[in-house]
Amino acid sequence: MDWNLWSEQAQDFAIRVLPRILAAIVVLLTLRYGIRLANGATNRVLKRVELPSEAENLILRLVRILVIVAGLVIVLLVMGWGQLALSFVAGLGVSGLIIGFALQDITKNLAAGILLLFQRPFRVGDRILVGNDEGTVTDIAVRATTMRTADGREVMVPNATIYTGTITNLTRYVQRRHSVELTLKRDVDSAPVVQGLAEIARTTEHVLEKPAAEVLITAVKADGLIVETRFWLPSKGIDSNVVRSNLAGRLRAKALAEDWLA
């Protein structure tokens, strides 16, 4: 063995590779600081924008992943493995496409969940109606939204279903209008009917003074007049079904007492 030749080759290797290894180590050590720096900068930006905690956590994770990927690419470039770096980046793209096609439904739910977190058509605590599902939102996750129904059931609705469907937020505004219908005789005098039913609505507990309750004759049918009593209730803090049932009973009792019912 030619020790002189081996020594020269070792020296040449050390001269060419050791600086790159040291630079790569420096990059890796700096990467941890870079992650902290990126997280701190992202947190400062997020404090200026009102976003749900789920959205903030998602953004922080994405920023962390991007910094790590960028750091690995820099390490490969520093080591002189530019082709490997390109292959690594291309591989990430191909892997993403493969995963996206293989998990289309999950991917759609994830994308819809991210959009819902940012657009916020509803929040935790809101009562919403999505298709045939109605309930109070208890959790908004990236994959699905969880609701608690009035009868105590827990319903998890995929976010893609919510995002592509019609969302009715029943508690977005502080007050909401309700109504009760009665069928009265066709020959009743409308003036005392309107006055009497409106007075009952106004004196029912939880019914708001403004907008004021109103009574309208909405249709004339063969079997009688359709009279609708409209009233407003707070959107939160009460059971609107209980209030509506109470008012319906009082209105019917008044109509029976006055012999208005058809």
Image (cartoon, rainbow, N blue to C red):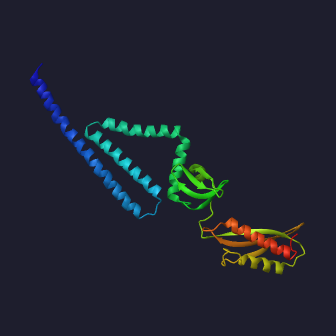
Furthest toward the top, the residue is 1
Quadrant occupied by the C terminus: bottom right
| Left or right of 220 in this view: 61 | left
User: What residue is drawn where x is 45% and y is 58%?
Assistant: 53
Pick whichever, 78 or 202, lies toward us: 202
Position in image of residue 35 (x %, y %): 32, 51
Please determine whether, in this image, residue 228 is positioned above or below residue 44.
below
Q: Which of the 4 quarters of the picture holds residue 82?
A: top left
Position in image of residue 86 (x %, y %): 35, 38
Please determine whether, in this image, residue 196 is positioned above or below residue 165.
below
Q: Which of the 4 quarters of the picture holds residue 41?
A: bottom left
Pick whichever, 163 or 232, lies toward us: 232
Position in image of residue 6 (x %, y %): 13, 25
Q: Which of the 4 quarters of the picture holds residue 176?
A: bottom right
Quadrant occupied by the N terminus: top left
User: What residue is drawn where x is 83% and y is 74%?
Assistant: 255
| Left or right of 205 in this view: 3 | left
Regarding residue 167, the answer to whether it shows in the image is no
So how many labels did they put on this image? 0
Position in image of residue 180 (x %, y %): 76, 68
Regarding residue 214, the answer to whether it shows in the image is yes
User: What residue is drawn where x is 48% and y is 39%?
Assistant: 97
